[in-house]
Amino acid sequence: MPTHGKFNKYARPLDRTGLYNYPKDGCDWCDVFYDWLLFEEFGLDVALLMSNQPMHGCGAGCEFSASYYRAVNQWSSEPSLGAQVFFGARGSESHTGVVVGYDAAHVYAVEGNTGYSAGYSGGAVLERTYSRGDSRSSGYGVPRWSVAGGSEPVVDVSNVWRDAGELEVDGWLGVQSVTAWQEALGTHVDGFVSGQDLADWGYVPNLVAVERTREAYGSQLVATVQKVVGADVDGLMGPQTVRCLQAWLNARGFGCGEVDGALGPQTAMAVQRSINEGAWS
């Protein structure tokens, strides 16, 4: 509930739209500040599609906003302009800001609800500088710029996973894993899943965003996966395709567990292990 001293001009217009599960004026507002930037620039409907947020949801909380990006693979370990940088352990993020610049050594972010140690009693909007790879950052949510008439950033993640020799087997099919999968299959490489995003339907809070993505992108990766695992080739990563994928992975010893048609973390880890071992090449 609202905390005295944190009332701010960014939450008020968002509260009037009914965006969040309850009014947030007075609460911690770093995530609210980022939502306000998208809202002011693109309007509510487009901002929701860009960030995969639901109406009346928990998008004012950092850990929830991060999960909305991850649910539709709008997640990267690399910065890009305008991306939402998150801080804290993965799954329990506690602070966020917007990337306004980066170079080989640093990431520059503007953050709301910060500066308390410097004497800003209600928090402030300040620019911060971080080292690339700062352990405090869990990653970056990348808005779907295409729904606002822009183009998706080209994120070069090839060196990230190749330098380590393999993907991190963490159960998140994010930009690094998808890029590696696309390269292994020889399909269009953009770090984003084509057709329908790789997420269990139960974890997709805004199906309109998925429909827009399906219209905006081809289905090369999904269709190629379907051909390899023996599923019907329709370019949609639905439960039937996931069951075929799970059976294919289990038959080759990658241990995805139950063949239930839900692309959860265990199946995602099996996919990552299969990519690391060259099963798709």
Image (cartoon, grey):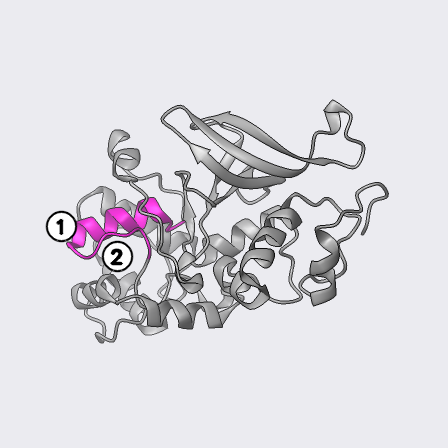
Residue drawn at (80%, 48%), measured in percent from left and top? Answer: 26
Front residue of 109 and 63: 109
Left or right of residue 202, residue 20 in this image: right
Residue drawn at (41%, 65%), measured in percent from left and top? Answer: 262
Per the image, label 1 sits on a secondary structure element best described as: loop
Left or right of residue 14, residue 52 in this image: left
Q: Amino acid at mark 1?
A: Ser
Q: Is residue 88 visible?
A: no
Estimate how packed mark 2 is, as few (under 14), some (14 to 19) or many (20 or more) residues with alpha carbons within 10 Å.
many
Q: Which mark is residue 281?
A: 1
Front residue of 201 and 189: 189
As displayed, is residue 227 above or below residue 129? Answer: below
Left or right of residue 9, residue 271 in this image: left
The range drawn in magenta is 172-192
Q: Is residue 183 magenta?
A: yes
Task: Determine the CA span between mark 2 and mark 1.
Answer: 14 Å
As displayed, is residue 263 above or below residue 29? Answer: below
As displayed, is residue 114 above or below residue 268? Answer: above
Q: Which mark is residue 28?
A: none
Per the image, label 2 sits on a secondary structure element best described as: helix
- Which x, y percent locates residue 69? 48, 54
Mark 2 or mark 1, whichever is nearer to me: 1
Left or right of residue 89, residue 277 in this image: left
Estimate how packed mark 1 is, as few (under 14), some (14 to 19) or many (20 or more) residues with alpha carbons within 10 Å.
few
Q: Amino acid at mark 2?
A: Leu
Residue drawn at (64%, 62%), measured in percent from left and top? Answer: 57
Q: Which residue is mark 2?
A: 249
Looking at the image, tell me whether mark 2 or mark 1 is earlier in sequence order. Answer: 2
Q: Kindly give the residue lying farthest to the front in the view shown.
A: 41
Q: Is residue 139 visible?
A: yes
Q: How many marks?
A: 2
